[in-house]
Image (tube, rainbow, N blue to C red):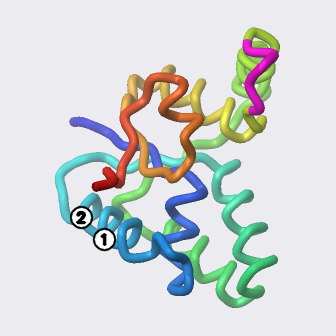
Amino acid sequence: MRRIFLDTSALYAAADRSSERHADCAGAYDELVRSQVGLVTSALVLAELHALTLRRIGPAAALTVVDRLTDSLRVEVRGVTTADVDAAVDLLRSRPNRKYSLADAVSFELMRALGIDAVLTLDADFVAEGFTVLPRTA
């Protein structure tokens, strides 16, 4: 079964109705949920999503967005190990001119380890690392 990784930027845009990319991201997420692809994210993405939503919208919305993902039977939330972080730090060292966040580097390494080549994101760094990005832009 094909799997798609879910990244913070698109998940946040899907949750925040005031985001200018809300319709694109919410529509793409809903389409993925209805499809037969597996949806994967990480505990680190959830933590990042919670912090972003907490700061921009508030505590109730932050808990709601995390609850929806963790309660979904369609979304697999992967834990992040010390080995995952070590691999991500090695990746950051190998790309000294890139401004990748540690969270993104962990996502890149998890995706590669799981054989996932596509991601729901608004972050162009995933394209730079060779992944297919959804939602597609016109």
Query: Residue type at mark 2?
Result: Glu
Residue at figure coordinates x 51%, y 53% from the top left: 122
Please tell me the numbered disc located at residue 112: none
Q: Is residue 3 above or below residue 7?
A: above
Direction top: furthest residue: 94
Residue corresponding to mark 1 = 27
Q: Secondary structure at mark 2?
A: helix
Please tell me the numbered disc located at residue 31: 2
Residue at figure coordinates x 51%, y 85% from the top left: 17
Query: Is residue 96 found inside the magenta-colored segment of the image?
Result: yes
Label 2 – label 1 distance at C-alpha: 6 Å
Q: Main secondary structure of the magenta part?
A: loop
Q: Is residue 39 above or below residue 20?
A: above
Residue at figure coordinates x 35%, y 64% from the top left: 29
Whether label 2 touches label 1, CB < 8 Å: yes
Residue at figure coordinates x 55%, y 85% from the top left: 18
Q: Nearer the viewer, mark 2 or mark 1?
A: 1
The magenta segment is 95-99
Q: Secondary structure at mark 1?
A: helix
Q: Position of residue 109 (x, y in %)?
A: 59, 24
Q: Position of residue 89 (x, y in %)?
A: 80, 21
In the displayed structure, does residue 17 sit left or right of residue 135?
Answer: right
Query: Is residue 106 found inside the magenta-colored segment of the image?
Result: no
Direction front: furthest residue: 138
